[in-house]
Image (spheres, rainbow, N blue to C red):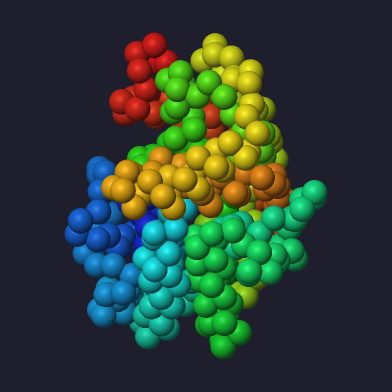
């Protein structure tokens, strides 16, 4: 008989890809979704969608009979105005999901954290052993993901079976919002990115991240976290490889980080008070000052995680954005 997965965040980027990976692996999927959410990523899939949110009082009833909870849902925002909503969704929401899973007798929870909770190793490559002091984590989003992960670890220490996965920066299809990285690709592919900031990230195929969740369920150790990453690349190198796929050159010019930093500060602190909608999050620019590089060796060694070449993910992302109207005819 098929195992039952209770999935949060299935309407999102990673969650939408995980829903498909679970179905391919033979699971029956019960996906939690808010009534007002965009459910496009779940359309056409043979799964059950249940109405509710991370703080619904009937979560344990909705989880009844599930073999595992995959808690992917999280609010992502780099805007300072959203700090309260981030804490409510990411921290209190995680606490609520863990409590409901205990009450429902769910055998294992796979909690989707982020390398944002780990922080940056200045001048080096971070692994699961590294932890930036919480006060050094930039922005309310990163701090909320750290606190959410602490909820998961505390539950594991208390005896609940909880495995934590920490994706890096995924690329691929079903990036509906899109994510900040997806937005960079769209702007580059549509000729709206004449310059860049010199920074670096660990990029990974979202399909590998989804498969890593299944491996964490099967082989992960409770109370452990596993980085699900791919390649450490500069933003310039990523855009060079994206450009190769479509015959477009990456931006030749880079700008010093102080320029967008100053613009972002003005937008969020001064112009927003006058009703202007800011375009650049101040904390997002602050993050770009250091390369965010990570090592996924632990997941490879303990889970059998084997991320594939990033170029396939880049091609899939371009194809999906083009087919879903995100790109101009010229970019296609």
Nearer the observer, 82 or 181: 82
- Residue at the spot x=54%, y=33% of the render? 313
Q: What percent of the width, then of the height, locates residue 252? A: 63, 18
174 is higher (above) or lower (below) than 237: below
Considering every residue shown, the one lying at the far right of the view is 123
Considering every residue shown, the one lying at the far bottom of the view is 158
329 is higher (above) or lower (below) than 291: above
Q: Is residue 119 left or right of residue 194?
A: right
327 is higher (above) or lower (below) than 160: above
Q: What percent of the width, then of the height, locates residue 277? A: 33, 44
Residue 275 visible in image: yes
Residue 86 lies in what quarter of the image?
bottom left
Q: Is residue 78 left or right of residue 271?
A: right
331 is higher (above) or lower (below) than 61: above
- Residue at the spot x=49%, y=60% of the render? 141
Q: What percent of the width, then of the height, locates residue 253? A: 63, 21
Residue 101 visible in image: no
Task: Give the quadrant of the C terminus.
Answer: top left
């Amino acid at each position: 008989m098929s195992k039952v997965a209770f999935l949060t965040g299935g309407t999102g980027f990673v969650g939408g890809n995980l829903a498909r990976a679970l179905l391919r692996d033979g699971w029956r999927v019960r996906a939690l979704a808010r009534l007002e959410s965009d459910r496009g990523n779940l359309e056409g899939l043979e799964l059950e969608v249940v109405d509710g949110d991370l703080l619904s009082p009937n979560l344990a009833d909705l989880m009844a009979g599930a073999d595992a909870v995959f808690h992917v849902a999280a609010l992502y925002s780099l805007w300072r105005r959203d700090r309260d909503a981030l804490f409510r969704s990411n921290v209190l929401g995680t606490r609520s999901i863990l409590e409901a899973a205990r009450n429902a007798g769910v055998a294992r929870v796979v909690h989707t954290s982020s390398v944002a909770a780990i922080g940056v190793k200045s001048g080096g490559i971070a692994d699961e052993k590294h932890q930036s002091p919480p006060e050094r984590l930039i922005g309310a989003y990163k701090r909320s993901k750290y606190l959410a992960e602490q909820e998961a670890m505390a539950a594991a220490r208390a005896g609940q079976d909880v495995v934590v996965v920490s994706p890096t920066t995924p690329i691929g299809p079903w990036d509906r919002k899109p994510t900040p990285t997806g937005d960079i690709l769209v702007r580059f592919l549509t000729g709206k990115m004449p310059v860049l900031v010199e920074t670096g990230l660990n990029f990974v195929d979202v399909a590998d991240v989804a498969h890593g969740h299944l491996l964490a369920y099967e082989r992960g150790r409770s109370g452990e976290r596993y980085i699900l990453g791919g390649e450490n690349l500069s933003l310039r190198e990523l855009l060079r490889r994206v450009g190769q796929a479509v015959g477009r050159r990456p931006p030749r010019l880079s700008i010093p980080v102080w320029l967008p930093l100053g613009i972002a500060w003005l937008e969020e602190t001064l112009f927003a008070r006058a009703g202007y909608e800011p375009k650049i999050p101040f904390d997002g620019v602050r993050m770009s000052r250091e390369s965010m590089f990570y090592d996924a060796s632990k997941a490879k060694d303990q889970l059998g995680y084997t991320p594939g070449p990033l170029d396939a993910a880049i091609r899939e992302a371009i194809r999906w954005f083009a087919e879903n109207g995100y790109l101009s005819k010229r970019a296609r």
